[in-house]
Amino acid sequence: MVTLPDEVVTERLRLPVWTADDVAAIRGGARRPGWHPDFPREDDRDAASMWRPDDPWSSRSIVRGTTVLGSIGFFGPPAADAGSEVVPEVEVGYGLVPEARGWGFATEALLGLLAATDAAGVRVRAAVDPGNRPGLRVLATCGFTELRGSDEDGRLVMARPLPAVPG
């Protein structure tokens, strides 16, 4: 099985996998040191309901310095794409507290995870509300060029092709 590091590091961010303590605090409504006052958001609480212990394909914090600004993660481990038995694929979700938006943190976090999924040979897809212009811009900047239509909630489903391997 392909795997990812427990922590991905970018120029300004750290993306550590959530621990059992993180998830217990999110689920229980507790506050942890280093959490932004607006974290966790509703989406973070939803992600905590899908958390899987000791799974690098689960939820991660988006940390700048010592402050948790949001979360990013996958909705499960890679699985063969319906159209290709060869290329494993995962769906990513991410979000930031309102104060952290517009600074490029979502793009940087996603690009950091994409570098790890590229190294693992895993393609990534995402779903975004059609009216979410910042979300669409993040996906476009990160190379999500394949439009696959919409999901049951009316969100656009986009995928990022794996980069060509130099040969």
Image (cartoon, rainbow, N blue to C red):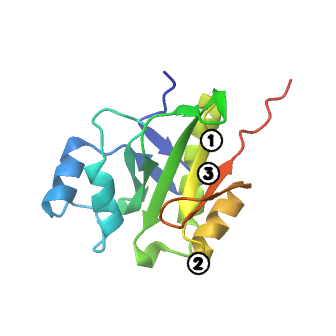
What is the C-alpha distance between the residues marked 1 and 2?
Answer: 27 Å
Q: How far from the left and from the top, in percent, is residue 96?
A: 43, 67
Residue 46 appears in view: yes
Query: Measured along the vertical axis of the image, is residue 51 above or below residue 54?
Result: below
Report crowding for label 3: few under 14, some 14 to 19, many 20 or more residues within 10 A (C-alpha): some
Q: Amino acid at mark 2?
A: Gly
Q: How far from the left and from the top, in percent, is residue 72?
A: 44, 54
In the displayed structure image, the side of residue 47 where residue 75 appears, left or right:
right
Contact check, label 2 and label 3, Cβ < 8 Å:
no
Q: Which mark's residue is nearer the viewer, 1 or 2? A: 2
* Residue at image coords 33%, 54%: 47
User: In the rendered image, which residue does mark 2 sit on?
Assistant: 131
Quadrant for residue 99, please give it: bottom left
Q: Quadrant of the C terminus?
A: top right
Q: Which mark is residue 115?
A: 1
Q: Which mark's residue is nearer the viewer, 2 or 3? A: 2
Q: Which mark is residue 111?
A: 3
* Label 2 SS: loop
* Label 1 SS: helix
Report crowding for label 1: few under 14, some 14 to 19, many 20 or more residues within 10 A (C-alpha): few
Earlier-in-chain disc, 1 versus 2: 1
Nearer the observer, 109 or 75:
75
Nearer the observer, 82 or 166:
82
Q: How far from the left and from the top, in percent, is residue 27?
A: 18, 57
Q: Amino acid at mark 1?
A: Ala
Q: Amino acid at mark 3?
A: Leu
Contact check, label 1 and label 3, Cβ < 8 Å:
yes
